[in-house]
Image: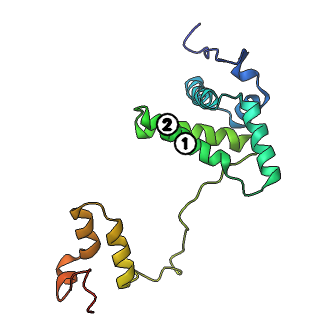
């Protein structure tokens, strides 16, 4: 085997590339190099072992869940749990994210796109500037702050000199 020959990866007695879903993934993706394909295949292999299922079974399960409930997000939760598992095992955050991206790519190229929560995008004409928080909102943020530094940031804000002039302790009810 030379450096340009991809390594054979067997999963449950079959070569990983023999699964129909993996063939479809590779054909639609057209990996840039043999090395990048090897890494992506390795990420999918790890996920399949973690789930104890082959790629075709994982896709079939997703299709079945989505046919019952269009809003089912079970696979998204599993993929995030797998990434957390990699991080807990000691993998660097970037390596765990790379594995997540490979797995998301596998689902996307098999027409089973995973949907994750994202921040809303607003245009410049929709932006209205910074919002001043109400006292209750600041108290709620303060309750979530863990250490004194975080609490100081919540109370002080971006310009602490202005924030502390004439301010009262958060716990006092006299406002």
Q: Is residue 138 left or right of residue 166?
A: right
96, above or below 4, in the image: below
Q: Residue, x 77% and y 47% (percent of image)? A: 65
143, above or below 170, in the image: above
**What is the secondary structure assignment of the residue under circle 1?**
helix
Position in image of residue 53 (x %, y %): 70, 29
| Image quarter of residue 148 | bottom left
Any part of residue 158 in sight: no
User: In which quadrant is the C terminus drawn?
Assistant: bottom left
For disc 2, the marked residue is 85
Q: Nearer the viewer, residue 159 or 165?
A: 165
Q: Residue, x 43% and y 36% (percent of image)? A: 88
User: In which quadrant is the N terminus drawn?
Assistant: top right
Determine the residue located farthest toward the top in the rendered image. 1
Position in image of residue 105 (x %, y %): 64, 41
| Image quarter of residue 4 | top right
Circle 1 Cα neighbour tier, 10 Å, few/some/many (<14 / 14–19 / ≥20): few
**What is the secondary structure assignment of the residue under circle 2?**
helix
11, above or below 151, in the image: above
Position in image of residue 56 (x %, y %): 76, 31
For disc 1, the marked residue is 81
1 and 2 marks in contact (CB < 8 Å): yes
Q: Nearer the viewer, residue 33 or 117?
A: 117
Circle 2 Cα neighbour tier, 10 Å, few/some/many (<14 / 14–19 / ≥20): some
Q: Residue, x 58% and y 59% (percent of image)? A: 117
């Amino acid at each position: 085997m030379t450096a340009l020959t991809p390594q054979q990866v067997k999963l449950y007695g079959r070569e990983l590339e023999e699964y129909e879903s993996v063939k479809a993934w590779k054909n639609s993706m057209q990996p840039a190099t043999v090395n990048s394909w090897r890494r992506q295949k390795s990420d999918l292999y790890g996920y399949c072992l973690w789930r104890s299922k082959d790629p075709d079974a994982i896709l079939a399960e997703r299709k079945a869940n989505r046919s019952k409930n269009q809003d089912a997000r079970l696979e998204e939760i599993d993929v995030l749990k797998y990434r957390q598992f990699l991080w807990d095992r000691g993998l660097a955050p970037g390596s765990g994210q790379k594995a997540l991206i490979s797995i998301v790519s596998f689902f996307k190229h098999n027409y089973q796109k995973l949907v994750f929560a994202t921040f809303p995008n607003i245009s410049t004409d929709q932006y209205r500037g910074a919002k001043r928080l109400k006292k209750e909102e600041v108290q709620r943020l303060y309750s979530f702050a863990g250490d004194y530094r975080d609490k100081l940031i919540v109370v002080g804000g971006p310009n602490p000199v202005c924030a502390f002039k004439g301010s009262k302790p958060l716990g006092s009810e006299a406002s």
